Image (spheres, rainbow, N blue to C red):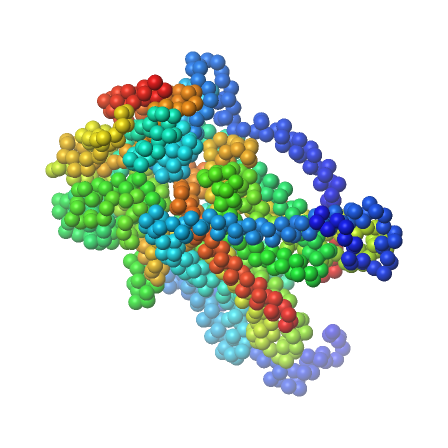
Amino acid sequence: MSTPTQQPTRDPGPGGRGTLATGTTRKGDAVFKGTSTGAGVLILLVLAGVAAFLIGQSIPALTASPEDLPEGQTVTAYVWPLLFGTVLAAIIALLVATPIAVGIGLFISHFAPRRAAQTLGYLVDLLAAVPSIVYGIWGAVVLSAWLVPIYQWLERNAGFLPFFDGPALPSGRTMLTAGLVLAVMILPIITALSRDVFLQTPRLHEEAALALGATRWEMIRYAVIPYGRSGVVSAAMLGLGRALGETMAVALVLSGARIITFDLIGAANPLTIAANIALAFPESSGLTTNTLIASGLALFIITFLVNFAARWIVSRSGAKA
Amino acid sequence: MNRRTFRRAAVPAALALSLGLAACSGENETTTTGGEGTSTSDLSGSIAGAGASTQTAAQQTWAAGFNAENPDVTVNYDPVGSGAGREQFLNGGVPFAGSDAYLDEEELAASEERCAGGNAIDLPVYVSPISVAYNLPGVENLQLSPTTLANIFNGTITTWNDPAITADNPGATLPDTRINPVHRSDDSGTTENFTDYLHATAPEAWTAEPDGEWPLQTGEAAQGTSGVVQAIGAGEGSIGYADESQVAASDLQAAALKVGENWVAPSAEAAATALDSSSRVEGRPEGDIAIEIDRTTTADGAYPLFIVSYAIACTAYEDATQGELVKSYLTYVTSEEGQQAAAERAGSAPISDQLREDITTSLDMIGA
Amino acid sequence: MTTTTGKSPREVLAAVDQPLSKAALPGWTPWALLAASVLVAVAVLLPGGTSIAAVAVLTAIVHLVLTGAVSRAKEGPRKAKDRVVTALVTIAFLLAMVPLVSVVWTVVSNGAARFDATFFTWSMQGVLGEGGGGLHAIWGTILVTLIATLISVPVGLLTAVYLVEYGGKSTLARAITFLVDVMTGIPSIVAGLFVAALFVILVGPGTKLGIMGSIALSVLMIPVVVRSTEEMLKLVPNDLREAAYALGVPKWRTIIKVVLRTSISGIATGITLAVARVAGETAPLLVTVGTTVATNFNPFEGRMATLPVYAYYSYTQPGVPPQPGIDRAWTAALVLIILVMALNLAARMISRFFSPKAGR
């Protein structure tokens, strides 16, 4: 549409299609190329639109005087504790999920019987198919109840650490529970990606290691892991991006406050940006809405950066391999 | 699986969808659109309200009851929150609003433009006691004085066998379980009324001003009334505040509060008694009924920890039919039948006959 | 490769040099050790009263220690390490199965109570307390997801065609590829906020419409469709394209009749997975579509109920008494899980039964 008169720039073969093509087909080509280019450009516009509208709707909150904003704080002061909670929950999730996901990735790619491997892979993928709302209710009802005795034990035996300072919350709906639910949710993502990289390890490297008398673990240690390291790092980054933005699971498990604390098992827990939006947005109006959109903008920027970094690592390692 | 099969499948699918949809509403919905002709009502149309989520259950009950009497009228209530409800009402988005707070001076002034020459009126149609619920197996009929309650929620009292609690409960054996106070995480009328109660009855122990947002950083936070009830139920030793109806429907116990020299358990009647001993706010426009709740009342059998939620309407509407609908809907809402239905379904306290008379007088101003 | 006459090579080797074949534990050893570990765990924990979880945890620890010790004594440290790692990764896998089993079990056992005809034929109009259903929410989910699919598939498909067939290494194509990658990471709530912000400007504050939810879901769905379609188009051998060109078929017809047709099953798989991903989304619908009690078939007018949001509100605001509302929430969650799992299964079926046998 935008380039109706352009000659076909990439002739597919030396056949000189131009001489055979009639006017109508060339027109068809132009239209088709125009539409598909348009679709691509539309995506750019949508992404630009996301940024533009979020910024546009944040400006009233950013420029308003603090007295008119929720709790009489500036937007920065409002978002800061939420940002802390977001990062804290995501880091817990990442620390828990990554080692397990790498283990599962290795199990499926190198340890499980070949015949069963694919089915076992599906089982892990099923974890990704459970909707987040279901994880949320499950976390609030089942998991938190499981964890209460563990939290009480942690408070008694590891209470000297600031993380387990307590007093342990009797309902178990704490930051650590939220982090663990997030860990379950990002587990299939990290697993799938790291499994794929492990499977791509050149067969020759593996066989060479085995031929030298290496045990299976030594082969993995010296052939598979070095090969897959950057893949695992980027998988973890993508999982981090997902954990940062996950909403409903946190909103249901953790109805926290906007505070900053490292106590992971206590009564007062920092809320995350996404959960706070989900909880507050449906009943918000006026500048509160703008403030929430501003917090969404902050979340957008953070996840954008994390994903950007993840892709950058992939592309860099891809160039090397 | 190619494009042609897709196309072949798509046309009948779209057809079936558009034809079938009309017949796909819920079985419970078909009756309401019929208009059997048995009704004597000649009202028809639809009105929408928006506002406090406190009233959601009651508004749904009223909408269903009103719809049964007037089959051609649909009432929708959008629980967007009190502030958003008042805002939408004032800019003409909805013909009536539900709000946990009455309109302030500024909003009243703004209402004159919206109300076609009239003004907005606040009508207290929803009254509900707030229970102090606790989860402490083996301990029944807990009694708490306002100061003890305030000290529990501000974190001064940390265990159940604290001398202050024992003093309030002579003869009871209390465990040394840790107290876990639970509060609402969202901005709510319930929190505002609870903190108002603490501030009025225990000013030394509770210094924070009444606010819809919980003023402290301690204690467990939970979303919504049912979130609070669930959190208390999930944790032994927890205590919190929630609508009486929700607490009564759970297995939680509700504490009796000290009023004057007596201990009063939460109930619809006790809240209604306390409402009657409260005064009206002075200097409001004619027809407006704003209640100044007397938290420190010592009236016999009064339970001063309750919430009053208002319906806000105009005395005049540009669209007279809309005014007529709002008027008849709110008349149903305040009727004995409407109040009774809400009491059963939403656990509210039915308003007194005196208050009903006053509201009816106000409603008569609409469109007059 | 065994010879029937004389000595086998293995026997010869064994005779020549003993140390080459080190002592190895028999194949059943891990299972025997596991059984022993279970016994130890039960024996230790049973006197104090115990739970399955505690036994499982202790079994895992005892098993790791036992395996390490036995293998080290018998086979040496290298082999022991190998066995311990094997046990560790197996435990990691089993650990991941715990939440899966627990989630499915919880939802099925709690959701079964209201998984009845009423749930699928009733909405919540005029329903208070017991009874009522999720028909309006089921229709809402179908409509919102369907419209999102109708928006996303053409855009996603055409973008992928552009990237593979036209874009080449141009700056535009590289920018699109990169941003599509980034877009897959947009938090769903942000997509919802974007649409909410957009409609504040277009219509006014507080607007909630079915179409807004569809647009929000499209923002999440398009990148998934683009990525999966792109992968599929890249798999189409160039020979096919060149053969078509050689016959004088114009490029656009080649793409439609040859390239897309060859890869259609893979594309359909990708689209189905994308639908499955967005059908369970709650957060964007919460801020754009809201909820209502009656069936609403008009995406351009008024709020719509959808299954995830219905489950959310039924759980968080169950009404009085709460139990019927909570039961409905679990059933809605169950229906949602069944829907999403069915879509995932459908995707696998499509790719298994309709895909051309590619060499891999």
Figure label count: 0
Residue at position x 83%, y 53% in the image: C244
Residue C75, position as x, y percentages in the image: 54, 78
Which residue is depicted at the point 44% across and 15% down? B42
In-front residue for pair B349/B214: B214
Q: Is residue A40 left or right of residue B299?
A: right
- Please state, as top left, top right, bottom left or bottom right, where the N terminus of chain B lies in the image: top right
- Quick one: A37 or B354, which is closer to the camera? A37
* Residue at the bottom extreme of this rendering: C16
**Residue B117 visible, this angle:** yes
Q: Position of residue A269 (x, y in %)?
A: 35, 55
Q: Looking at the picture, how far across and down is residue A321, in whole percent?
A: 64, 71
Q: Front-most of B132 and C113?
A: B132
Q: Residue at x 52, y 75 (%)?
A: C80
Q: Indicate whether B93 appears above or below A109.
A: above
Where on the picture, by quarter, is residue B331? top left
Up the image or down, C234 lies above or below A38; here it is below
- Would residue A169 be seen by someone viewing this image from the given angle? no
Q: Quadrant of the C terminus of chain B?
A: top left
Question: Residue at image x 49%, y 18%?
Answer: B35
Name the side, left or right, on which A130 lies relative to B82: right
Residue C90 as seen in the image, left or right of residue B330: right
Q: Position of residue B7 (x, y in %)?
A: 72, 39
